Amino acid sequence: MESLWQDLRFALRVLRKSPGFTAVAVLTLALGIGANTAMFSVIDAVLLRPLPYKGSDRMVVLYGSAIDTGNFEQWRQRLTSSYDRFAAFAIGATNITAPNEQLTSLRVSEDFFPMLGIRPAIGRSFISADFESKNPGVAVITDRLWRTDFSSDPKIIGRTVITDKAAVTIIGVLQPKFGPLPYWDIDIFLPLLPGRATHTMVVLGRLRPGVSPSAARAEATEIADGLATNVARRNRPLIEVEPFKEIVAGDARSMLLLAAGAMGLVLLIVCANIANLQLVRFAGRKREIAVRNALGASRSRITIQMMIEALMLTLVGGALGLLVAVWTMSALVSQVPFHISRIGESRIDGTALLFTLCVSASSTLLFGLIPALSSCKSDPASALKQETGIATAGAGQRRMRKGFLFAEIALATMTIVGAALVVKTYLVLRPSNPGFDASNKLTCGLTFLESSQDQRIVLLRNTIQRIAAIPGVRSVAAVSDLPMSGMSLIPNISIDGHLVAGLGNGLMVHYRLSTNNFLRVMHMPVVDGRGFESYDNEGMPKVAIINQTMARRFWPDGKVLGKRVAVDWGGKPTEYTIVGVVHDARIFGIDPSFKPEMYAPFWQDPFGRMTLVIEAAHNPAGIVPAVREALRPFQSIVAGEFETMEALLRSSVARPRFDALLFGCLAGLALLLAMLGTYGVISYGVTQRTREIGLRIVLGAQGRSLLGMVIREGMLLAGGGILLGIGGALVLRKFLSALLFGISPTDPVTIITAAALLGAVALLACYIPARRAMKVDPMVALRQE
């Protein structure tokens, strides 16, 4: 026991006397252990941890054009070989009166709650009788809605509310946390009634034990073919089967897996860095080990001493790494600008921490013990005869250090190239010029509860007049779906009797209804023809404005004005005459390309849902209370959330912006570690060659030549690692493409820029020790015999 305490005290003295090595090693370990633990803890919470449902690992989701409420019972009866239980659900929007607002609703089948094991905290769930009437009749609400809209009313059960102009009785309130669903912002649950035709219905099925997803998919495809109608047979019905866990994770799955891969590369860089530091440090301690060996220290005692030093480094690095992990995970969870299911349940994962500690400790021990053990076998006299004051290393160790540096640079290059492509994606998608002016615009969705078209026209006109009278409001317009929102109506489009676009056609025309002044308010210029005028109303021939992309696609000769377009919503087609061409504007945040668009006057086709666009003189958020007050008298209008147009633009690219930030941080970490590794190897190489450099100076070598010699050797290693890393990044391009939009994973400019950045950092890491070599005093160097 006494010898152990002696070894511990000696290890502390040794590490304290090497503050540079200790600080770099501990910092490297802390960053590697902390970052990897945080990332894998998040991945465990979001992707790996089982869902809190019975048999969740066997749950799959079936969706596609072959499934709707009309044939759900047939699916239930026929899917018997692969599945043992089913439920169905359909996302939607429900308008509630008093207070007037639009809620996100989920219509569910009778088996939905029992299958997932979800029970209300108050009241009851749905029963068979709730699915027999033509109207929903009853509803189950979430705890959030109960607390916000109903002030946690303990007598909520049995209370009647008006949803979509129908009376609904609240029969239950769910628990505050009832498990993740594919849709996270659900407010109210309603019965999914037979005959309510919807193609957004999704079937949740649980596979029988031992049934593979591929077999379940094959059975579902065969049933879809059998249920297809004559129309559907001309276009093979689509059916998709995916694990429920993947649907819940959503788009975050690919981002987190790629981040985990990048973090794995960073961990390898950490290991290579630590290995190099240990090898460099051992070369400076060969004489110390030889002296201890000559004084009678046994091989096992020296080995134990080295192990204690390595373990102390790992433990200190791990303790700091735990703090880094807590901070990193907290920052990651709080900075995510979009919903990721269960990310709030992230906790420091002990398995991930233990794994990264073991990997780092193995690297520290392995490359600290192997050379030390080999030194114990060597003759102490030969080690003591080596140059005093200069540490030397064998050719094998020098090759090993250079090999680790080579691998470290290659891994860093792969990480930085991948991150640069993700950052470039965000720069491409960033809506610097979306095709409209978003400044000083306030938006708010409106839903008209009145079904009469005439009533909708009157409601919107009166609403616009009241809001336009508010001080500080310049103008008010309305559109069915805002640009950059990703939402639009998709009809079938025919030209000269030929179907040219539609949902099943491969090409889609995005159809929008707007008030006459919408294009002017948004500063979207009409480049040909005219905009909508006051006489384009319900009593006049129907007119339309198309964008430049649609004009080029269907009329490449430029003769657009006066052409007729037929719009078909499943009934009798309606013809529109094109009276103008508007400048292109972006529709999607994650797709920078322009799509064919068509605008029609709201007054000629009053839609039941519109979005107000209010242009303010300044500070649009400041007029929200006045706008709310102006909307209050309209009981037949349900207003949505208020949002500025600039905020909408930011949220439209929130995902690529977060990806760029995350991978940019990983690239910065890889760059820092690569710089430390390069500096350590080159700096130690200069120290090893102090006597040689002194001789060169005595023999007339100039400082520039010495500078070039050191930099050339370092850059040859760095250049080889960069080339290998570029090759590795190209091999992994297929995995990286999931995060890229509007840019190729082999984009040469981005790859060359990333490689040049790493090369510049490597050059700086070589230049500092090279400058030190120029200042070597030849007399001091030659005395070191």
Image: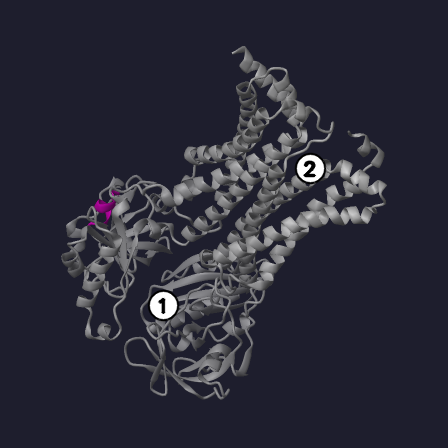
Q: Is residue 775 visible?
A: no
| Residue marked by disc 1 | 608
| 144 relative to 482, above or below | above
Residue drawn at the location 57% of the way across and 51% of the way down: 413
Left or right, 163 with respect to 638, comes to left
x and y, in percent, of residue 213 in the image? 26, 53
Nearer to me, 147 or 413: 413
Q: In the image, which residues are magenta?
A: 111-118
Left or right, 419 with respect to 387, comes to left
| Residue marked by disc 2 | 684
Q: Is residue 266 visible?
A: yes
**Which amino acid is tagged 1?**
Gly
**Which amino acid is tagged 2?**
Tyr
x and y, in percent, of residue 275 in the image? 57, 36
Q: Secondary structure under badge 2?
A: helix
| 646 relative to 461, above or below | above
Residue drawn at the location 46% of the way across and 46% of the way down: 260
Confirm or deny contact between disc 2 and disc 1 (CB under 8 A): no
